[in-house]
């Protein structure tokens, strides 16, 4: 009888845990669709600005962003501090999914698109910048709250 009571209480506890959705994210947690935000596409083109406005991100939110190079030149983005402040879920290039441990920078030698999915983690101010550039329009200012 005692075993039956213990088993019944364990079953009730596991059911309560499985149904617990107090955060509204569902069983997938941070990776659930309700937590996903699409950022504006970033066009990489020689001499053109990278973004119309700074990115304001929330810690714990899942974001996806497409980086598209128009092929006007070899161009990349560096942002070591930013890449250390996020958890990179995946990088998708031509339908191939890459699940890296971390990123330091990205670069396009030719025209193409890369999608990066990530969770913002560490609050602070960061930027993604075209290496070697000094102009304000050659960087994306990012704030994680």
Image (tube, grey):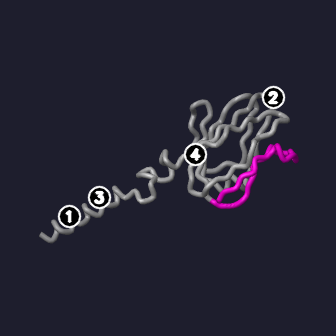
In this rendering, the label closer to the viewer, 4 or 3: 4
Q: Residue furthest left?
A: 1
Residue 113 is situated, as x and y percent measured from the top left of the image, at 67, 32
Q: Secondary structure at mark 3?
A: helix
Provide the residue designation for mark 1.
8
Residue 141 placement, left or right of 5: right
Q: Secondary structure at mark 2?
A: loop
Provide the residue designation for mark 4.
37
Distance between mark 1 and mark 4 Cα atoms: 41 Å
**Mark earlier in primary sequence (4, 3):** 3
In this rendering, the label closer to the viewer, 1 or 4: 4
Write down the region rendered in magenta: 122-145
**Residue 27 drawn above or below residue 130:** below
Q: Residues within 10 Å of mark 2 (few under 14, many from 20)?
A: few
Q: Residue furthest bottom?
A: 2
Q: Which quadrant would residue 98 be assigned to in this image?
A: top right
């Amino acid at each position: 009888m005692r075993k039956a009571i213990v088993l019944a209480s364990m079953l009730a506890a596991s059911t309560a845990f499985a149904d617990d959705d107090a955060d509204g994210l569902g069983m997938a947690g941070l990776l659930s669709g309700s937590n996903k935000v699409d950022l504006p596409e970033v066009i990489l083109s020689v001499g053109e600005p990278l973004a119309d406005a700074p990115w304001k991100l929330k810690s714990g939110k899942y974001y996806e962003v497409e980086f598209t190079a128009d092929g006007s030149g070899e161009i990349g983005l560096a942002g070591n501090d930013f890449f250390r402040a996020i958890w990179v879920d995946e990088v998708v290039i031509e339908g191939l999914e890459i699940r890296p441990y971390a990123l330091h920078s990205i670069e396009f030698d030719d025209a193409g698109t890369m999608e990066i999915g990530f969770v913002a983690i560490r609050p602070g101010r960061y930027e993604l910048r075209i290496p070697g550039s000094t102009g304000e329009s050659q960087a994306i200012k990012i704030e994680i709250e």
